[in-house]
Image (cartoon, grey):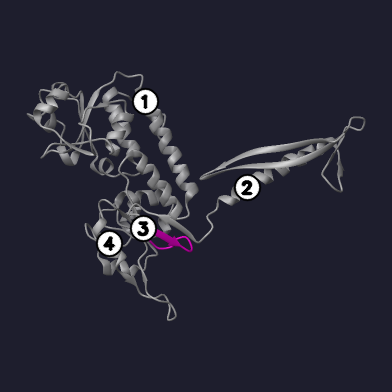
């Protein structure tokens, strides 16, 4: 009697999962220790040749992953609700947002970046790329570079986004027509938004696998800190964004999310990303630790000696940490460093944190 077996394989390759089924019919002949495989025109093989079945399955897996490649043209909705239509991967990219620039370099897109702003200063290789402005984009410089994709931060660069979308690029040939600049907006506010931003930039630049690898590395570091922090005493915290007026990170912001991942009870008022508090409310909340940047405080003593904080537990115990302003204010790949600095300062971690660093 033939023995019918179906090999069911689960193949996971971001962003899709596949189930691959290989139907196989076996005829077993115990006397000769041999197997016959197939439907019509069955082929007799020796016992050791079962290895070929394994190789067949392996080749099936390799073939299945090839379906994950992006098939152009594609359409992708951005943070502004606009639809980006692409006939091929971008070859000439401009980024006008420092966090987006860091994402692009992490996705190994250095050779495709043709324009940045003066604020895009990390990594060091970014300093050698042509600049198209600082706080405001010079449209003429951007057009001269002839980009096929411009990436912007929707919240911070809405005006530049709208100006560029109204700008036409000169035709690439005599037969071609002028075309508007292709602009794609992202809006990384929360930690999950940062993850989503990395993923969608991977899609529009045809670097989905690189984006997946970066996300896995980031999430591994976040998960490590979160799990380790659960073993520590829970501390009340505030993340100070602006000194005048006193403004703190609230729900929906990545800095609030990071403070929660670090195991803190963030005592900022609920209701939005930016929360103002008066001295009385701060003293009543009584944070054990205050997190801020060097741009805001310059020195921790400028916070714990401040009349708005000196009566809190953080002020009395001098538990104020100032983090590098660039990584503190950029919703990109280096937010994991912000998280690690928060936790290291609060809990006195030393060698433990080195376990997850590259």
Q: Relative to residue 159, is residue 337 depicted above or below?
A: above
In this view, the residue in front, 238 or 341, is 238
Q: Is residue 342 visible?
A: yes
In this view, the residue in front, 2 or 317, is 2
Q: Relative to residue 340, is residue 86 depicted above or below?
A: below
* Gap between marks 1 and 4 measured at Cα: 48 Å
Mark 4 or 2: in front is: 4
* Gap between marks 2 and 1 measured at Cα: 42 Å
Q: Residue at x 18, y 42 (%)?
A: 295
Disc 2 secondary structure class: helix
Residue 178 coordinates in the image, percent (x, y): 37, 74
Left-right relation of 210 to 34: left
In this view, the residue in front, 218 or 82, is 82
Can you tell which mark lies on residue 64?
2
Mark 3 or 2: in front is: 3
Q: Are marks 3 and 2 in contact (CB under 8 Å)?
A: no
Within 10 angstroms of label 4, few (less than 14), some, or many (20 or more) residues?
few
Q: Is residue 298 visible?
A: no
Disc 1 secondary structure class: helix
Within 10 angstroms of label 3, few (less than 14), some, or many (20 or more) residues?
few
Q: Which residue is mark 1?
A: 351
């Amino acid at each position: 009697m033939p023995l019918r077996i179906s090999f069911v394989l689960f193949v996971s390759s971001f962003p899709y999962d596949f189930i691959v089924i290989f139907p196989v019919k076996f005829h077993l002949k115990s006397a000769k220790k041999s197997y016959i495989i197939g439907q019509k025109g069955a082929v007799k093989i020796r016992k050791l040749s079962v290895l070929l079945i394994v190789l067949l399955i392996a080749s099936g897996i390799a073939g299945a992953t090839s379906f994950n490649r992006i098939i152009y043209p594609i359409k992708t909705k951005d943070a502004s609700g606009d639809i980006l239509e692409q006939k091929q991967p971008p070859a000439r990219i401009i980024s006008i947002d420092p966090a987006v620039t860091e994402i692009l370099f992490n996705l190994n897109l250095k050779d495709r970046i043709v324009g940045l702003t003066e604020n895009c200063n990390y990594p060091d290789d970014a300093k050698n790329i042509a600049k198209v402005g600082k706080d405001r984009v010079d449209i003429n410089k951007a057009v001269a570079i002839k980009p096929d994709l411009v990436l912007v931060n929707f919240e911070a660069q809405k005006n530049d986004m709208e100006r560029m979308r109204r700008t036409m690029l000169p035709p690439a040939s005599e037969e071609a027509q002028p075309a508007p600049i292709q602009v794609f907006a992202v809006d990384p506010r929360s930690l999950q938004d940062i993850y989503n931003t990395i993923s969608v930039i991977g899609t529009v630049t045809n670097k989905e696998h690189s984006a997946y690898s970066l996300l896995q590395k980031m999430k591994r570091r976040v998960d490590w800190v979160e799990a380790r922090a659960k073993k520590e005493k829970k501390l009340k915290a505030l993340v100070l964004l602006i000194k005048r007026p006193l403004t703190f990170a609230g729900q929906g912001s990545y800095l609030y999310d990071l403070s929660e991942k670090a195991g803190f009870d963030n005592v900022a008022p609920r209701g939005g990303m930016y929360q103002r508090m008066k001295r009385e409310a701060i003293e009543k909340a009584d944070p054990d630790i205050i997190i801020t940047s060097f741009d805001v405080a310059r020195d921790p003593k400028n916070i714990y000696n401040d009349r708005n904080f000196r009566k809190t537990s953080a002020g009395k115990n001098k538990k104020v940490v100032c983090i590098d302003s660039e990584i503190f204010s950029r919703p990109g790949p280096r937010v994991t460093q912000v998280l690690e600095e928060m936790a290291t300062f609060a809990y006195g971690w030393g060698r433990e944190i080195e376990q997850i660093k590259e």
